[in-house]
Amino acid sequence: MRMYLVTEKYKIWIPAGATQKIRSGLLTGADLYTERIQSVALKSYQFIYHLASHKIG
């Protein structure tokens, strides 16, 4: 079952095994993909949210 980080406008696919990394703040570009942004180097949950809410579209 796929998991998603859902913001007001966007749905970000969270690959299996990445949930724990999100909780511990250890996400990398290889761990997170969206339909439009792929393999972006991401360092924190906050940056992911910022990226999702301001850069997609």
Image (cartoon, rainbow, N blue to C red):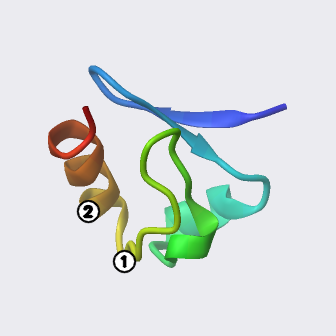
Q: Where in the figure is residue 15, as x and y percent of width and height?
A: 71, 52
Q: Where in the figure is residue 1, as x and y percent of width and height?
A: 84, 31
Please say whether residue 27 is visible from this viewpoint.
no
Which residue is located at x 27 percent, y 21 percent? Answer: 8
**Quadrant in the picture for residue 42:** bottom left
Residue bearing mark 2: 47
Q: Where in the figure is residue 56, as x and y percent of width and height?
A: 27, 39
Which residue is located at x 33 percent, y 56 percent? Answer: 48
Q: Nearer the viewer, residue 57 or 4?
A: 57
**Quadrant in the picture for residue 18:** bottom right
Q: Around disc 2, counting alpha carbons within 10 Å, would you say few (fewer than 14), some (14 to 19), or many (20 or more)?
A: few
Dot 1: element:
loop
Above or below residue 23? Residue 56 is: above
Dot 2: element:
helix
Which residue is located at x 26 percent, y 62 percent? Answer: 47
Q: On the picture, is 24 further left or further right than 54? A: right
Above or below residue 2? Residue 51 is: below
Query: Amino acid under label 1?
Result: Lys
Q: On the picture, is 50 further left or further right than 26? A: left
Mark 2 to mark 1 CA distance (whole Å): 7 Å
Which residue is located at x 55 percent, y 53 percent? Answer: 33
Q: Nearer the viewer, residue 23 or 53?
A: 53
Residue bearing mark 1: 43
Above or below residue 48? Residue 24 is: below
